Amino acid sequence: MVERPVVLSERALKILSEPAGFDPGPTPKMPRTREVRPKKLPRQRKPKPVVVEVVPIPCVDCGELRALASTGIGKKRLSGHSDRCEVCADIDRFKATIADPTTKTHKVTRCRRSLQRVLRDGRAYHPDAPHGTINGYEMYGCRCEACRESKSAATAHYGRPLRSAREKVAA
Ligand SMILES: [Zn+2]
Ligand SMILES: [Zn+2]
């Protein structure tokens, strides 16, 4: 077997040429190449989102104050739509539905009843509704506290609990 000649590096040859006990002196310091990072500033806290408080404002049509309604997730919104209260908001829509000859009878009845509503404590209220029933909420469009409660109870009953109800359970 033929041994391969050992090829020494330049550095190895230099070391070998040095006399025993040779002190090469202190290793020259290499210049620092890594960038010195600036000290981390304390993390800035995110500013809390500004909660715009919803305040009751009057309806542009009837001038009555519109009450606040719950959104179901613990927040409040102004009842009604756009600039109008719950009673004034959909009047034109109800009238159009009644005027439409293709509208089914029970829907016409519902729209007629909706037009009979008045604003009470800022919410739509039907004077003849069977209050505290789902019928009062659905067929008379009544949004009094008793009717709203039966509606939310019914929604929870059908296995689609309102988020507010779930939150109550989790708390
Ligand atoms: Zn109004
Ligand atoms: Zn009611």
Image (cartoon, helix red, strand yellow):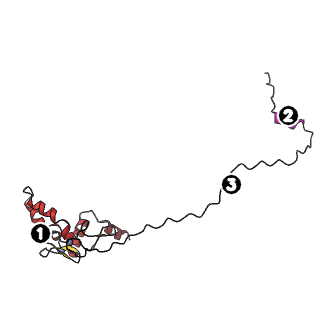
Q: Quadrant of residue 128?
A: bottom left
How far apart, in angstroms, are the residues tagged by discs 1 and 2? 106 Å
- Which residue is disc 2 drawn over? 13
- Which residue is disc 1 drawn over? 113
Residue placed at 81% from the left, 25% from the top?
Answer: 5
How far apart, in angstroms, are the residues tagged by discs 2 and 3? 37 Å
The crowd level at tag 3 (other Cα within 10 Å; few <14, some 14-19, many 20+) is few
Q: Amino acid at mark 3?
A: Val
**Closer to the camera: disc 2 or disc 3?**
3
Element at label 3: loop
Question: Please, is residue 125 above or below residue 12 in the view?
Answer: below
Q: Which residues are magenta?
A: 3-22
Is disc 1 in contact with disc 2, using a CB cutoff of under 8 Å?
no
Residue placed at 27% from the left, 62% from the top?
Answer: 160
Ligand 2 within 8 Å, label 1 CB: no
**Nearest to N terminus: mark 1 or mark 2:** 2
Pinpoint residue 108: horizontal percent, then vertical percent.
9, 63
**Closer to the camera: disc 1 or disc 2?**
1
Q: Is the magenta region chiefly helix, strand or loop?
A: loop
How far apart, in angstroms, are the residues tagged by discs 3 and 1? 76 Å
Q: Quadrant of residue 52?
A: bottom left
Q: Amino acid at mark 1?
A: Arg
Mark seen at residue 36? 3
Left or right: residue 162 versus residue 103 is right
